[in-house]
Image: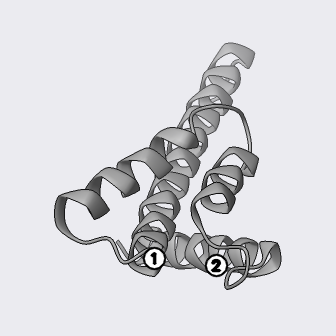
């Protein structure tokens, strides 16, 4: 049985769409985790913490990439106790955690 070009194209398109959706879900999970961490660092709890996490997730919709999330966190966290490198490190750590959680189900 031979596979037509259109079948191959459709297969690649389906894989691309699946991979893009998976990446979106992983990044949203990362944003939720880093937002919860930052909310705790700010001393927020309950509804205020939930609203902050939602704002971090929404910040990721501003532009492609991670800089929008970084700018949100940078604006919200005290520079004296949270360096740029520390914030970026937490973002990377939580991305790793979100990827691990996505793989393990």
Q: Residue furthest right?
A: 85
Q: Residues within 10 Å of mark 1 (few under 14, many from 20)?
A: some
Check the image and report above or below for 88 versus 29.
below
Residue 20 x/y as whole percent: 59, 40
Q: Which mark is residue 37?
A: 1
* Left or right: 12 as drawn, with respect to 55: right
Where residue 19 appears, as percent x and y from the top left, is 59, 45
Residue 90 badge: 2
Mark 2 vs mark 1, CA separation in Å: 9 Å
Q: Is residue 5 left or right of residue 52?
A: right
If the image is split into quadrants, where does the N terminus sit? top right
Quarter-wise, where is residue 96 in the image?
bottom right
Quadrant of the frame with the C terminus:
bottom left
Q: Is residue 30 left or right of residue 93?
A: left
Color encoding of the figure: one colour
Element on which disc 2 rests: helix
Report whether 54 appears left or right of 8. Answer: left
User: Do the residues bearing badges 2 and 1 touch, measured as CB atoms within 8 Å?
Assistant: yes
**Vertical order, 66 against 30 (above or below):** above
Mark 1 element type:
helix
Mark 2, residues whose alpha carbon is within 10 Å: few (<14), some, or many (≥20)? Answer: some
Position of 50 relative to 42 (above/below): above
Among the 4 quarters of the image, the one containing residue 59: top right
Task: Where is residue 17? Give x, y as percent.
Answer: 57, 33
């Amino acid at each position: 049985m031979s596979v037509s070009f259109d079948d191959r194209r459709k297969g690649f398109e389906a894989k691309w769409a699946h991979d893009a959706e998976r990446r979106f879900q992983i990044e949203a999970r990362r944003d939720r985790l880093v937002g919860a961490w930052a909310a705790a660092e700010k001393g927020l709890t309950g509804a205020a913490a939930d609203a902050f996490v939602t704002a971090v997730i929404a910040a990721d919709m501003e532009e492609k990439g991670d800089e929008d999330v970084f700018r949100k966190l940078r604006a919200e966290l005290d520079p004296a106790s949270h360096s740029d490198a520390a914030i970026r490190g937490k973002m990377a750590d939580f991305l790793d955690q979100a990827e691990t959680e996505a793989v393990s189900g």
